[in-house]
Image (tube, coloured by chain):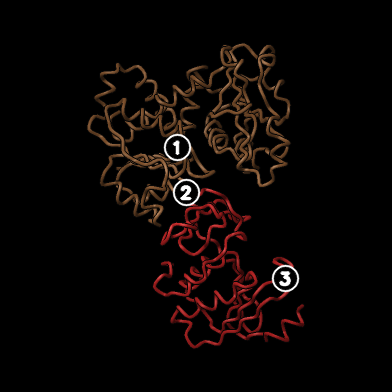
Amino acid sequence: MKKDLISIDDLKLKKIREFLDLAEKIEKLPDTDKKALLSGKVLAALFFEPSTRTRLSFEAAMLRLGGSVIGFSDTVTTSVSKGETLKDTIFTVENYADVIVVRHPREGAARVAAEISRVPIVNAGDGANQHPTQTLLDLFTIQKFFGKFENLKIAMVGDLKYSRTIHSLVQALVKFDKVEFHLVSPDTLRLPDHIKAQIEEKGNPLIETTDLSSAMSCCDVVYMTRIQRERFPDALEYEKVKDCFCINLEMTKTARTGMKILHPLPRVNEILPEVDSTPFAGYFEQVKNGLIMRQAILAHLLGAL
Amino acid sequence: MTDEKILFIPKIENGHVIDHIPAGLGSGILAIVGFHPELSGIPVTLGMNFKSRRLGTKDLMKLQIDELPPAFVRHLSLIAPGVTIKRIKKFKVERKIVAEPPEIINGLLKCPNPNCISNSERHLRTCFHCLEKKPMVFACNFCERHFAIEELEPILQVAAKPSLVVKA
């Protein structure tokens, strides 16, 4: 049966652990073995909206596994600009590729693609809804740093209201036992109630605060997010909160030993460059893990692992 | 309020009353009455925009038929889940049931999220999964957002085409 990766909500804990194990396994493979995994396979990267690191990491992942890549990174030069439906695009591209990676501004686009496609579909972001490969790479990063999820204290900082990365990560972390959540955000960007309810339903400890320093002093992971200007209808409201959480070198002095700062990137002012060289910076390791996790996902969906 | 009801819609001796229809939805239900041949030719009365403590305003329908066809009831629960169906015998309410929403609703409700793919992709059938029945909450199969039943707008023009009526 065809496998897809559309939403973190579709994955049971066992499946998440399977992806984490596969990523670990693929990381240990020699380059020559990796190169043979997807030899002769073609990935179609259909990016209906701009993306840099997600698209490049999928393409790099496929190339490093011996496959090749076709696709587009904007819709201006494609039939989409002529009014072609997503359905017709998928019906066409499935003839050219063995796996299709879709990023689309409309929520649910990847689900539609998966329902009609004969080849596996990977959701690389659908509007403000889901970005499951980001979540899996975040989990992989946390596992690599701490070797476990149970009893970890994780601070989520910044735009908790609109960030799909945060929503998906929370939905994944509540599947593990005893993760303690520290939600650090301005009042206007708090985590939506229905996501918060998922934390409370599972009985995970939950602390809401606006004090980033205190969260840094007690948490194992501090997950920063960018306050997204494009989400604010009122520019003045954006100005009020845009730089409200910023980690500098001074703040890391009171951080818990072993604490790691993560960020899905791109960053603006949330983490100053002076923090990059400290042992707390985990975000570039996170980027590297993104490549490994996407290799694991592609190899798994194509039956090579 | 009771006086107004008596004034505009007389009591029926035997039959069924469909109550607590969200205002404006009555005409949609009238449309589906026409699809069920068992209901052909029976006296039907539709009242619109009555005051309602629960809904603010509501529509009300009376059908003078002893037994409602099960297919019609299932169809009704898709179009207007939550309405009350009262069976009337000798001017009295003999039995009262609430039309329960089905677990899955295909093609009959519109997703209120303007950025949902179901609102832009042509010919895509909407699909909602029931998450909670009290209060009724549905999740869109595509954008995964959760909505109270009141937020979901019926696609009445779909119901008006017999060929597109969902199998009840």
Rendering coords of residue B96 (x, y %): 61, 70
Q: Are marks 2 and 1 on the same chain?
A: yes
Tell me if residue B73 comes above or below residue A94 in the rendering: below
- Identified at 29% across, 22% down, the residue is A34
Which residue is under mark 2? Answer: A108
- Identified at 67% across, 85% down, the residue is B9
Left or right: residue A251 compared with residue A6: right
* Chain for disc number 1: A
Q: Quick one: label 3, few (<14), some, or many (20+) residues within 10 Å? A: some
Left or right: residue A127 compared with residue A243: left
Rendering coords of residue B98 (x, y %): 59, 66
Which residue is under mark 3? Answer: B52
Which residue is under mark 1? Answer: A11
From the image, state whether disc 2 or disc 3 is nearer to you.
2
Three-letter amino acid code at disc 1?
Leu
Colour that chain A carries in the picture: brown
